[in-house]
Image: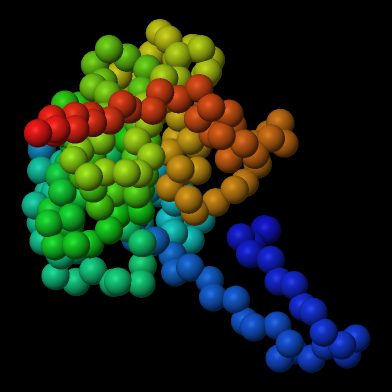
Amino acid sequence: MILPWTILCVGTVNLSARSCPTPRLEPKPIILGFAGWTLPLTSYHGSAVEQIIDRLRAEGASAEIYPPNDWPTVAERLTNHADADRPIVLLGFSMGAAAAIHVAQKLGAVGIPVRNIVMVEAWNPEPIPANVAAATHFYSTRFAGLIRPGPGNEGLVENIDLNGQIPEIETASHVAMSQMALVQDLVIDKAGVRDDKDQAGTTVAAKSRSLCRDATVAPRRRTPPAPKR
């Protein structure tokens, strides 16, 4: 694994361990995922988000999953017990994407930042609040609603159309596309917890960057200047 920092030591030939400061590694993010609409509404078993969360846990990430209706409880818990040193990453599929945005809105109201929201096939998403540094939406069907920045948001807000990028995704349904391994790889990469390789030896992160070059960055509404008096 290549760590995301580089150390340069400049000085005498005999460099002691004290010559280089110990790098401060970023704490592992808190990853919270919200499944889509299922029956009963308290269930998330078999969902794509559950599969993603299981894979993240297997790689050592701190990740939890919730049904979409649990978002008020999750928001309250984070508001009262958020670890200021650990970045927050939210994941959501379909109705769960809307739930993730609701959580971010509640956190923004009390000044808690969100590092990233990663969504698949977002259903009726509200604007991304100002406390979210980045938001990415992967979609392929007409069911999905495009995300857009809310007032004060200066982060990256992008919609990535996967049609033509992943084999057979054009014929996949709203649910079926979320079950595709390549789609889940992109979500895991965007969550920022790994950089592993697929069978062809190409990093998933490189694939994600390639897709992001073709992403549609959500337009921002600009307030027209006040007329001069």
Residue at the extreme front of the image, as rendered: 229
Residue 152, x across and y down, in percent? 22, 45
Residue at the extreme top of the image, as rendered: 171
Q: Is residue 28 above or below residue 117?
A: below
The quarter of the rendered structure image containing the C terminus is: top left
Determine whether, in the image, residue 194 is placed left or right of residue 121: right
Q: For the point 46% across and 43% down, which residue is it?
A: 190
* Residue nearer the viewer, 120 or 42: 120
Count of all numbered marks drawn on residues in the image: 0
Q: For the point 14% across and 33% down, which residue is it?
A: 228
Q: For the point 69% across and 35% down, which residue is it?
A: 202
The answer to whether any part of residue 71 appears in the image is yes
* Residue nearer the viewer, 9 or 189: 9
Snapshot quadrant of residue 100: top left
Residue 16, x across and y down, in percent? 79, 91
The quarter of the rendered structure image containing the N terminus is: bottom right
Snapshot quadrant of residue 31: bottom left
The answer to whether any part of residue 65 appears in the image is no
Residue 49, x across and y down, in percent? 32, 40
Q: Is residue 128 above or below residue 108?
A: above
Snapshot colouring: rainbow
Residue 105, x across and y down, in percent? 15, 49
